[in-house]
């Protein structure tokens, strides 16, 4: 059996039953998912209004907010904030990967470290991610042990997983303490308060958002939700459908650190970051929102459940899609941000992804629509995707 088959079978056997168990034991999750879908549709129906409200709310909190159209604009802003010769820790941002932020900062002479364990492993292996929330899912524990033996030492292919994690923990703790800048994504952003919500289990995002003096959050405009109450729902739903409920940590950031301990007068900064920057990214999302079929993809909460129920992903793995986007959701997002119709062509329309999606996205219909767009652009007849 190939290494991919071994690794993905282990992951599926671990993850799939856990999601069904979570939903059975916490039936309110499905109701929260319905509320989340409605809140996200409200934003997509009034996207320009909510983008403006979010930018202003961040500024009201003492932060800096930017709207960028593409990769080039995002890199320019991040480059100006970070500068050169800095230590940067990154807290697993798919949008930062999409925009090439890590490699751009490295080209400026910065030392940049991925701090999510999976992202750290693929950074060390110089490989693309293979799953939206488990980027090193293609690696067996034996291959991880061999990689860490080569890069860090102290473990090998026969070591326990706990010992492998401990080696990386010790290495990255030093980077967190010395870091000048922390960069994260966002699971949700509240338009009314400018707050950023992040869900995680490792604790690396807590370090990344608090230890450095500068925190930069980079996220697509589709992450905006109308209110902080709406945004608080997203981490619960995402972690549940990822089979990791309850999440170990949920982080909420509203501007630079603050204190009101003297005369209850709130001032900034305090012990945490002195600067907070939010970069809202278009990069194809606004155009997709104007297409009645494609806009469904913008509802995706990146739980990765569709991957584990897709026979095509199981068969061909991380070569399906443009990194960091893989699997059924990745085939949609490869078109939105890269204009690439080829990943959609792999879909065999089993329909499993539609059945398990917490946002009830009709993924097969979106992919068939992308196939039509691809064929149309080549001057061929359209398919009937109704």
Image (spheres, grey):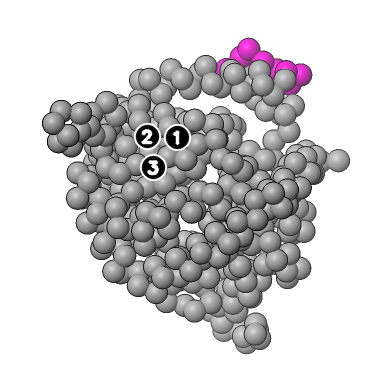
Q: Nearer the viewer, mark 3 or mark 2?
A: 3
Q: State the SS at label 3.
A: strand
- Residue 145 percent across, percent down from the top left: 69, 23
**Nearer to me, 261 or 63:** 261
For the C terminus, the image quarter is bottom right
Of 3 and 199, nearer the camera is: 199
Name which residue lies at 68% across and 53% down. Answer: 23
Q: How many marks?
A: 3
Is residue 151 left or right of 2 when viewed as pictured?
left
Name the spot of residue 224 as percent of width and height, x first.
Answer: 39, 59
Residue sitting at the far right:
1
Q: Are marks 1 and 2 in contact (CB under 8 Å)?
A: yes
Instruction: Specify whether residue 278 is painted magenta.
Output: no
Pair 1/3: label in front? 3
Residue at the image point whose x is 32% and y is 37% from the top: 215
Q: Quick check: is 156 in the magenta stretch?
A: yes
Residue on which the image places disc 1: 205
Task: Mark yes or no: residue 330 visible.
Answer: yes
Q: Residues within 10 Å of mark 1 (few under 14, many from 20)?
A: many
Q: Which mark is residue 81?
A: none
Q: Secondary structure at mark 1?
A: helix
**Which of 347/170 is in front?**
170
The tag earlier along the polypeptide, 1 or 3, is: 1
The label shown at residue 209 is 2
In this orientation, does residue 86 appear? no
Bounds of the magenta segment: 150-159
Q: Is residue 265 above or below residue 147?
A: below
- Considering the numbered disc 2 on the image, is that residue within a helix, a strand or a loop? helix
Residue under pointer 3? 252
Residue at (53%, 77%) from the top-left corner? 293
């Amino acid at each position: 059996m190939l290494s991919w088959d071994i690794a993905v079978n282990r992951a599926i056997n671990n993850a799939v039953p856990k999601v069904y168990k979570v939903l059975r034991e916490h039936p309110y999750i499905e109701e929260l998912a319905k509320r989340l879908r409605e809140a996200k549709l409200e934003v997509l129906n009034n996207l320009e209004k909510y983008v403006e409200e979010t930018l202003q709310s961040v500024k009201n909190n003492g932060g800096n907010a930017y709207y960028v159209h593409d990769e080039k604009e995002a890199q320019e802003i991040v480059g100006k904030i970070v500068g050169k010769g800095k230590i940067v820790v990154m807290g697993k941002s798919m949008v930062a990967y999409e925009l090439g932020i890590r490699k751009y900062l490295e080209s400026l002479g910065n030392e940049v470290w991925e701090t999510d364990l999976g992202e750290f492993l693929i950074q060390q292996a110089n490989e693309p991610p293979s799953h939206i929330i488990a980027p090193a899912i293609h690696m067996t524990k034996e291959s991880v042990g061999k990689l860490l033996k080569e890069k860090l030492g102290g473990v090998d292919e026969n070591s326990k997983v706990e010992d492998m994690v401990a080696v990386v923990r010790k290495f990255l703790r030093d980077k967190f303490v010395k870091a000048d800048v922390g960069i994260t994504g966002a699971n949700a952003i509240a338009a009314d308060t400018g707050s950023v919500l992040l869900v995680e289990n490792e604790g690396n995002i807590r370090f990344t958002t608090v230890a450095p003096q500068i925190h930069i959050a980079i996220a697509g405009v589709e992450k905006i939700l109308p209110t902080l109450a709406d945004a608080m729902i997203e981490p619960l739903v995402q972690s549940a459908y990822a089979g990791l409920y309850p999440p170990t940590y949920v982080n909420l950031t509203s501007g630079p650190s603050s204190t009101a301990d003297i005369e209850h007068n709130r001032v900034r900064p305090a012990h945490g970051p002195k600067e907070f920057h939010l970069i809202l990214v278009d990069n194809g999302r606004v155009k997709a929102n104007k297409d009645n079929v494609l806009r469904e993809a913008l509802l995706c909460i990146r739980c990765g459940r569709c991957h584990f129920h897709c026979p095509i992903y199981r068969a061909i793995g991380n070569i399906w899609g443009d990194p960091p986007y893989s699997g059924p959701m990745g085939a949609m997002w490869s078109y939105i941000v890269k204009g690439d119709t080829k990943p959609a062509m792999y879909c065999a329309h089993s329909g499993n992804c539609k059945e398990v999606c917490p946002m009830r996205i009709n993924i097969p219909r979106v992919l068939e629509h992308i196939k039509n767009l691809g064929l149309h652009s080549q001057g061929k007849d359209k398919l009937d995707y109704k």
